[in-house]
Image (cartoon, rainbow, N blue to C red):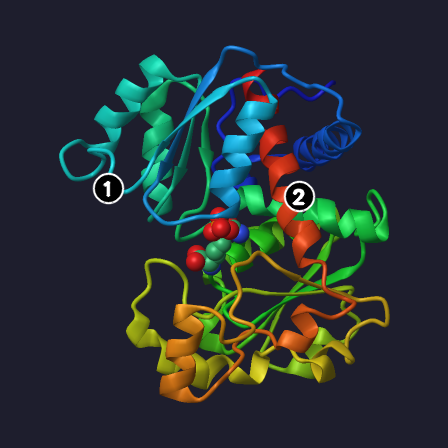
Amino acid sequence: MAVSLTGRHFLKLLDFTPEEIRYLLDLSADLKAKKHAGEPHRYLEGKNVALIFEKTSTRTRCAFEVGAADLGMHAVYLDPSASQIGKKESIADTARVLGRMFDGIEYRGYGQERVEELAEYAGVPVWNGLTTEFHPTQMIADVLTMEEEFGRDGMRGRKVTFMGDAGNNVGNSLMVVCAKLGIDFCACGPAEQMPDAQLVETCREVAAQTGATITLTPDVDEGVGGASVVYTDIWVSMGESADLWGERIRLLSPYQVTTELMAKAAPDAIFMHCLPSFHDRKTTIGEEVFQKFGLPELEVTDEVFEGPRSRVFDEAENRLHSIKAVMLATLR
Ligand code: CP
Ligand code: NVA
């Protein structure tokens, strides 16, 4: 049966079948080709979307705003200080108000239960633009980027390794998407920063059906050996205390992605990162961490970030095409 996602929420990838994820990947590639060819695709002319951001963003916000405009829609951005959400108005009330005015709602913020509650009450599709637990739109962009390197469906049976803070929203989501698509996933980091045991179990059940494997290891050689994709993310995520930097540096420094570490991966391995990244001292936080702890580069070295195996800016561009696919698939 043909896949249709019309009217669906996009809250986490566990809610989607492999066929539905495949559909979103193909739609993303199609929208990318149209954008590059300058072919108009205003399929959602006249619709309106609300973009709620309780945490900051560059890529996700811009992808939703530009994507909405490309599809013929109008987007309204609500930043943490510009709306009543949470302070004067509950999530449920906000959802019922915005659901009367908008055709779809994006939410970036804290606990997954907040976006789930928004979806319960909105009456229109709700899209998760990042929560503490998951970052599902990122994953469509990421697998699209991997397939641009290794071919459509070319990731099946290959190994993707997430280095470092593997229990964060991006590590969790990467584990889920790999399990769903039959891609071998490895979380390589200290026991303290591994994905939640319950989520690992759920992903292993999914993996048993798709042929994927899920490995958790503190051993760098085992983790990176044979990997086609080496992926990392920042060591302290949005919403976490800056006081954690010292502890995270102690725990995660052995998992920094360096040229030597990339040499242990498959010869054709690529490097990926959701961004933003602390690969130099050219940011306020990067400089502060350097002044306090003496590390000029954190989760990845500048050499790898800027090197020939890095695909981070293709990945960032693909946020636009994949977020457009999510909006189009659920609103058409
Ligand atoms: N990767 C990502 O979600 O980036 P932003 O925080 O800039 O949206
Ligand atoms: N783990 C990061 C991802 C940013 C896109 C964070 O939540 O801050």
Please tell me whether mark 1 sits on a helix, a strand or a loop.
Answer: loop
Residue 90 in the image: above or below residue 317: above
| Residue 198 seen in this snapshot | no
* Residue carrying label 2: 318
Q: Which of 78 and 16 is in front in this view?
A: 78
Residue 195 in the image: above or below residue 282: above
* Residue carrying label 1: 81
Q: Nearer the viewer, residue 37 or 263?
A: 37
- Where does the image place residue 86, in percent across and percent down from the top left? 20, 39
* Disc ID at residue 134: none
Q: Earlier in the sequence, mark 1 or mark 2?
A: 1
Q: Nearer the viewer, residue 216 or 318?
A: 318
Q: Which residue is drawn at 53% across and 56% down?
A: 170
- Where does the image place residue 58, in percent across and percent down from the top left? 48, 48
Q: Residue furthest top?
A: 46
- Where does the image place residue 52, in percent across and percent down from the top left? 36, 35
Q: How crowded is mark 1: few (under 14 residues within 10 Å), some or many (20 or more)?
A: few
Q: Which residue lies furthest to the left in this view?
A: 88
Please tell me whether mark 2 sits on a helix, a strand or a loop.
Answer: helix
Quadrant of residue 220 within the rendered picture: bottom right
Q: Is residue 98 left or right of residue 290?
A: left
**What's the distance in space between the residues labelled 1 and 2, CA to CA?**
29 Å
The C terminus is located in which quarter?
Answer: top right
Quadrant of residue 297 within the rendered picture: bottom right
Is ligand 1 less than 8 Å from the beta carbon at label 1?
A: no
Q: Residues within 10 Å of mark 2 (few under 14, many from 20)?
A: many
| Residue 56 seen in this snapshot | yes
Type of amino acid at the residue the image marks with label 1:
Ser
Residue 142 in the image: above or below residue 71: below
